[in-house]
Image (cartoon, helix red, strand yellow):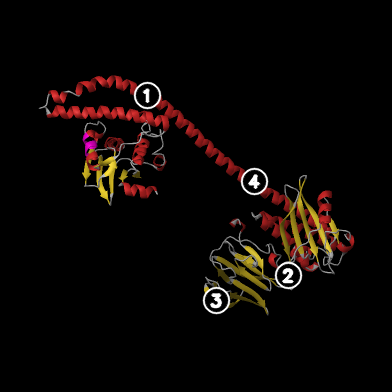
Amino acid sequence: MDPTDGPLSFELEEVTRIGRERDCHIVLRSDPLVSRRHAELRLTGGEILLEDGESQNGTFVNGEPIQKASLRQGDIVRVGRTRLQLQVSPLHISRSPAEPLIEGQDFVFKRVNHDKGSSIGSLSAAAFFEAIGLDGVVDINSAESSNVRRRTRAFLVLFELSQLLQRQRDPAVMVDICLDTLIEVLGAHQGLVVELDDAGRLVTLGARSTGGPQSSRPVVTLSRTVCEKVIADRCGVLTNNPTEDFHNAESMVFASTTSLLSVPMIVGDRVLGLLELTSFHPGHSFNESDLDLLSVAASMLGTTLEARRLEIQRIATIAKLEVAQRELEAAQQQLIAQHQRATLGQFAQRMAHELRNHLMAPMAMLEPLPERYPNDENLAETVEFSMVALHTIVGIVKEIQEYAATGQLEPPMLVYGDLVAVARSAVHYLKYDRDVNRVSLRLKVQPVPLVPLDESRMCQVIINLVRNAAQATSGPDRFVSVHVYPDGADAVLEVRDNGCGMGLDVACRAYEAFFTTKGTGGMGVGLEISRLLIHQHKGELTFETWPTLGTTFRVRLRPPTQCQSTES
């Protein structure tokens, strides 16, 4: 319910039950601290007695726990999280359904000090005109007063019903509220609402009676003859002698029915179903005013149900459109990625061709130099470094070609190796990198277990992570640390920086192909290729990031037995 509606008022019956069960008079389903049958109020000898129903969380009056207590004007009763205040007034016309569904609101109980209850239909003429403020204005003994009372009562009932229906979202509760109100006002014993489904069949939306909850009510017999008449002719049916009026109707059983009202629910040019009231009391009969009131109420209920149905359809349609929109966006992103990979593949193919043509000569010149000058250690180191760099460049271009063509990489050649040695080699190589030279590069290693790895490709991953870290740092105290350490049987390598870190929007897209924050300085495939390489090593690549504090990437490699267990 909308909390802006304010506290709700309920009239006390001789016995008023409070709890989560549907057959309670005050149903508090959404309060998790209320028991199924939490408490009971009784009107006894002019007193209002409150008794706890062995609830799990107890019943309180003015903040004190009680088992049984006599209530006075203004007392505050608390059950679960819900507060209720007792108010005694000489007269109150009820504005609440018989089974309200309450969502954690405060309530005001008002005791009605008359014997016949508070329904508009049960008030005497004097009480009725007093309740609506016309006492002393209309002569209750005049003939005109009866007409005024009839018309005013119908208006008040419809106004009250409209307010009650507007507060509800559940169609089943709307039907119950409408039936309970009409049964009380028109003095009926049973009420039934049915609708026509898409196949033209009648489907029950709700059935209520004065006999209590649905499980204890007599079965409502629906007349096929009356239904066909009401729906086909779009007219109301009023009979105070159904057994005689429909004696040839083989499908009807009117053994105990003394009066019947049945009207169509019409919205626009469509008949949605019908609303029917029956009475079993021999002295009771419906009149044309009752038929008119029921017709308007049925139209009001039908309009409210149809509006709610359309709202539910609208919500479902919006949800479907949102799903379709997400699928379309995913398809568009896939097409974009395919186009980007195709473009990258064409570029890599041309670059590989040019590199092979231009690198063959330098490699041929460098390779014999160590043998020609065996005593020059610096030259030998420079040649080795240059040859590794040239082979790495060719390998990277080849991997980009493979990734662009299939989105995958060629499986690595895994052999047992030392991650510490690979980390030392990568850091040694990075001493000559321009971006890395701008920061303090720190290496810390501890002995780790041998794990299956492709040294060349693992070195490529470390170089990529360190260069990314160096490019993300700024300031005089910039550093990037490489730490290799054991974690049980695992070998772990961490690359940490004290740079700008990543925001949530960037972190969520870190592994997304072709996503880059470097502008024209990057292609956006380095981390994705690194992730694929680590996955081929049966390992994990994860990261932690803190905006303005830096980022830590973590590579975890496992022995073969743990890899098989993880995959299982």
- Give the Cα distance between marks 3 and 2: 28 Å
- Give the Cα distance between marks 3 and 4: 48 Å
Q: In this rendering, would 6 be left or right of 359?
A: right
Foreground mark, 4 or 2, reads: 4
Quarter holding the N terminus is bottom right
Instruction: Kindly indicate whether the residue at mark 1 contacts the one at mark 4 (C-beta within 8 angstroms).
Output: no
Q: Nearer the viewer, residue 269 or 475?
A: 269
Q: Residue at x 21, y 35 (%)?
A: 428
| Magenta region, residue range | 424-428
Q: Is residue 106 above or below residue 300?
A: below
- Give the Cα distance between marks 4 and 2: 40 Å
Q: Pick whichever of labels 3 and 2 is earlier in the sequence.
A: 3
**What amino acid is at disc 2?**
Gly
Q: Which residue is mark 2?
A: 117
- Determine whether the residue tagged by mark 3 lies in a helix, strand or loop: strand
Q: Is residue 502 above or below residue 151?
A: above
Predominant SS of the magenta segment: helix
Q: Which residue is mark 3?
A: 66
Q: Residue 349 — which label?
A: 1
Q: Residue furthest left?
A: 375
Residue 529 visible (yes or no):
yes
Q: Is residue 330 above or below residue 157?
A: above
